[in-house]
Each structure stands twice: as structure tokens, then as C-alpha cells.
Image: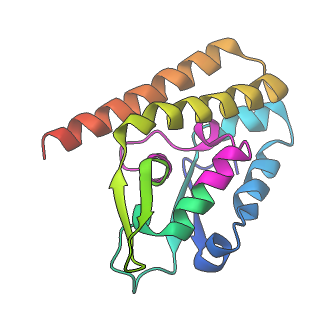
Amino acid sequence: MADFDLISLVIDRESIEKLDYSIIQKYMDKCSVSKDTLIKCQSQLDFSVFGYDDDNRQLCEIIEVINWVNKSIYDGMPWFYFLSKSPNSQGLKILALCYIAIPEQENDGCWRFKLELSKINECIGLNFTNMNNFMDDNIGDELLKSEISQQILAYYQNWLDANKKK
């Protein structure tokens, strides 16, 4: 696993709706067989969601996807350690968009969503906490923790800057 530049996992609709992220947990467990393997797996993961092709909403507008992302974050998933920081990767974008999407059910029963950009700091803070706890328990490398943190902040800053221009 550590011999690849990028591992892309596809999360199916059934897993999303069952709030099951065991496929990602299995990947992380395989990476955690040794400290060396774990270090090689850093920033190698990306994920996408499959099964909503017939749905015209964006992923961050699908309540089940939002719930899946939020549960994984609240359960302590160390996304920031494992997810790719490549500008073309989708995982970090999905995390942020689903976390800051605020669903509101209207009187007609339909869901409406607004992006609450003020929640981006909360999203990043929770994910940094998860990453730091994971790294403290498994690696203990403060320099690596700092490098990853800088990469994460640069990734999100570049993404936000690119979207301001559109």
C-alpha cells in the first residue's frame, strides 16, 4: 500500500446511508502495521462517493453524505493525516463542504442548504484535533505534524483563493 502515490477509495451509497466508513478504517488499519508504513501512507488517500449519479444535488446537499462525513469527524477519523493534499484531490473538499453545509428543512418538506463559511474554522479545528491525537498515539513526530498542518492550511487557502476568482 505504501508503494503507491495515491489510493482512491470509492464509498458506495449503502455505506453512506448506513453511516459505515469501515472501508476507510480498514485502509488506515493496514497502514498502521508499523510506524514506517504509517509514515509512508501519509497523504496517500483520496475518496469519492458513488451511487448518487441520478441525484442532481451536489454531495454537500445530500443529507446522508453530510451525516456520514460529520459522524466520521466526530468519531475521531484522522482525515488530515491520510488524505491527499494534491490540488486535484477531492477528499478534503468533500469534508469541508459537507461540514459547512447547513441543512434546513422547509415547510414543504424539502431540504435547503446554505454554506456557512464561518464553520470552516470549526471543521479544520476538529480535524486537526483528530490528526494530532492520532499522531500522538502512533507516530509522535512534532515536525511531521507541523508539516502536515502547513500543507492542510495551504490546500484550503489555495482552494478558497481559486474559488474567489470564479
**Apparent side of residue 50 relative to residue 128 in the rendered image (left or right):** left
Quadrant of the rendered structure where residue 54 is? bottom left
Q: Which of the pair 5/57 is nearer the observer? A: 57
Quadrant of the rendered structure where residue 144 is? top right
- Residue 17 x, y percent position in the rendering: 64, 74
Question: Would you say residue 93 is visible in this rendering?
Answer: no
Q: Can you name the residue that lies furthest to the bottom here? A: 54
Q: Which residues are magenta?
A: 70-97
Magenta stretch encompasses residue 120: no
Residue found 51% across the figure and 33% down from its top: 122
Residue found 68% across the figure and 36% down from its top: 40
- Residue 81 x, y percent position in the rendering: 63, 36
Relative to 13, say whether 152 is above or below.
above
**Apparent side of residue 55 relative to residue 132 in the rendered image (left or right):** left
Question: Would you say residue 19 is visible in this rendering?
Answer: yes
- Residue 124 x, y percent position in the rendering: 51, 33
Give the color scheme: rainbow, by chain, secondary structure or one colour: rainbow
**Apparent side of residue 41 relative to residue 84 in the rendered image (left or right):** right
- Residue 103 x, y percent position in the rendering: 44, 60
Quadrant of the rendered structure where residue 119 is? top left
Magenta stretch encompasses residue 81: yes
**Apparent side of residue 110 relative to residue 32 in the rendered image (left or right):** left
Residue found 57% across the figure and 39% down from its top: 43
Relative to 60, say whether 40 is above or below.
above
Q: Which of the pair 99/27 is nearer the observer? A: 99
Q: Which of the pair 120/35 is nearer the observer? A: 120
